[in-house]
Amino acid sequence: MLAPAANDPGTPHRDAGWESAPDSRLYNDDLAPTEPVRRTWSTYNYLALWFSMSMEVTTYMLASSLIAGGMNWKQAILTILLGNLIVLIPMLLNAHAGAKYGIPFPVFVRASFGPRGAQIPAVLRAIVACGWFGIQSWIGGQAIAQMVNVLAPGTAGSQMVVWVCFLGFWALNMLVIWKGVESIRFLQSFSAPFMLIMSGLLLVFMLRKAGGFGPMLSTPSHFTNSHDFWRFFFPSLTAMVGYWATLSLNIPDFTRYAKNQESQLVGQAFGLPVAMVLYSFLGIAVTSASTVVFGRPIWSPVELLGQFHQPVLAFLGLIALLVATLNVNIGANVVGPSNDFSNLAPRLISFRTGGLITGFLGLAMMPWKLMATFGSYVFGWLVGYSGLLGPVAGIMVADYFLVRGTKLDTYSLYRRGGMYEYRNGFNPAALIALGAGVAAALVGRFLPSLAFLYDYAWFVGFFLSGALYFLLMLGQRGTRPASA
């Protein structure tokens, strides 16, 4: 029998027949509420989680792309800080249910979408995470290829080496997945301090090469008028929010292991914005320095390290990139989609099997094209998928806080026919709100006259879908559950 989740306050309403075994289509050991003995994550673990996930290549490239796009370092830092403070809000709101009930994202989203309808946002989120998994694997493979080039200069330019290294790094990720979530916590706890040290060394090296912070941060803004600046700023801000849009949904996959609400709240509220600003500053400063040292802004740290003529320094830097990339790939891009795929068929797909599916889909999404230029990375990939995930976040927040008052019936989340059944397992209100939000957010991608909607894709989707869902649920009789 499914036991009540730890920290479940009071006695929630239970539907008739709640004492029956959970539906095997909705339940397995990976999806079950986390047992109290497994709730071991402290504030430090969440700090380490965000520092390790922030200190990686795509964060660096996110920041450096703003410099390459024309911002000066102050404008870039403020854009990144504002974007991360914004995305922290839905992050903490959705994290609450994970810590309170011990449930992962695929189970949590059943409350708003229904047990069958929940598969739609879960798959959307999973596909985006698969794309990120492929991107990280590609970057890690390039880093290994650069290491090979340092040791054997004759291999420089060999595509065979790049592809062998890429697939080898992909296989390493698969091995860590097979070890399970506790191996992730172990890896992150020790790698965060290591990455901080290595990042500091890179900054000091480029500082000396550029002749100090003055020349290093002297690159002026390339925008000659406010119109051009704002036209670049707003989609860039959307990209900053979109960068963590996936984690803002599946953060319950991590907070379900929290010792208490305070641990995850303090750890995330401090860890996310501070880690992102600190590491983004590194990307901004080093990219600005590359303009001074090499005559052009180099936005990829892998390419930058390849320019060094000191083999030891380049080798250590590339090792740091590998550790960081492995961290974020497992923590941010595997845990969530593995649970999502498991939710599709709990009897057949375990967490490990879901991880393998994630890996193969990551390969199929051709990450080498997604990372071809900083424009395709920021305005194509980040802004584009934020229009898919913003509406889901808006619906989840509106349902949990406005409709249900943070009260969930844990038992009914694992059974058909209960209060979350809606219509044959689908909640029409959620599907209508999702469709409207996605359409509004992405229509500007195809209609130039509505391009401004695409520039604000995450915001448009989040607020439109959240508001529409709440209004539709108000119109349904018996919306508010008895447990609330």
Image (cartoon, rainbow, N blue to C red):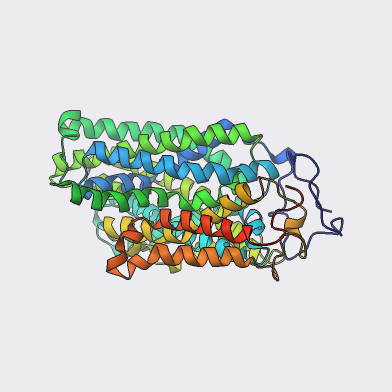
Q: Tally the numbered discs.
A: 0
Front-lying residue, 348 or 241: 241
| Image quarter of the N terminus | bottom right
Task: Tell me if residue 252 can be seen.
Answer: yes
The residue shown at (54%, 41%) is 92
- How far from the left and from the top, in percent, is residue 369? 33, 65
Q: Left of 188 or right of it: where is 181?
A: right
Front-lying residue, 195 or 434: 434
Q: Left of 61 or right of it: where is 44?
A: right
Q: Is residue 382 above or below residue 435?
A: above
Q: Left of 149 or right of it: where is 51?
A: right
Q: Is residue 413 above or below residue 197?
A: below
Q: Is residue 40 above or below residue 369?
A: above
Front-lying residue, 68 or 80: 80
The residue shown at (56%, 50%) is 397
- How far from the left and from the top, in percent, is residue 330? 52, 50
- How far from the left and from the top, in percent, is residue 429? 60, 64
Task: Tell me if residue 180 can be seen.
Answer: no
Front-lying residue, 144 or 131: 131
- How far from the left and from the top, in percent, is residue 350? 66, 60
The residue shown at (48%, 45%) is 327
- Toward which corner of the image does residue 381 lie, by quadrant? bottom left
- Toward which corner of the image does residue 385 lie, by quadrant? bottom left
The residue shown at (80%, 50%) is 13
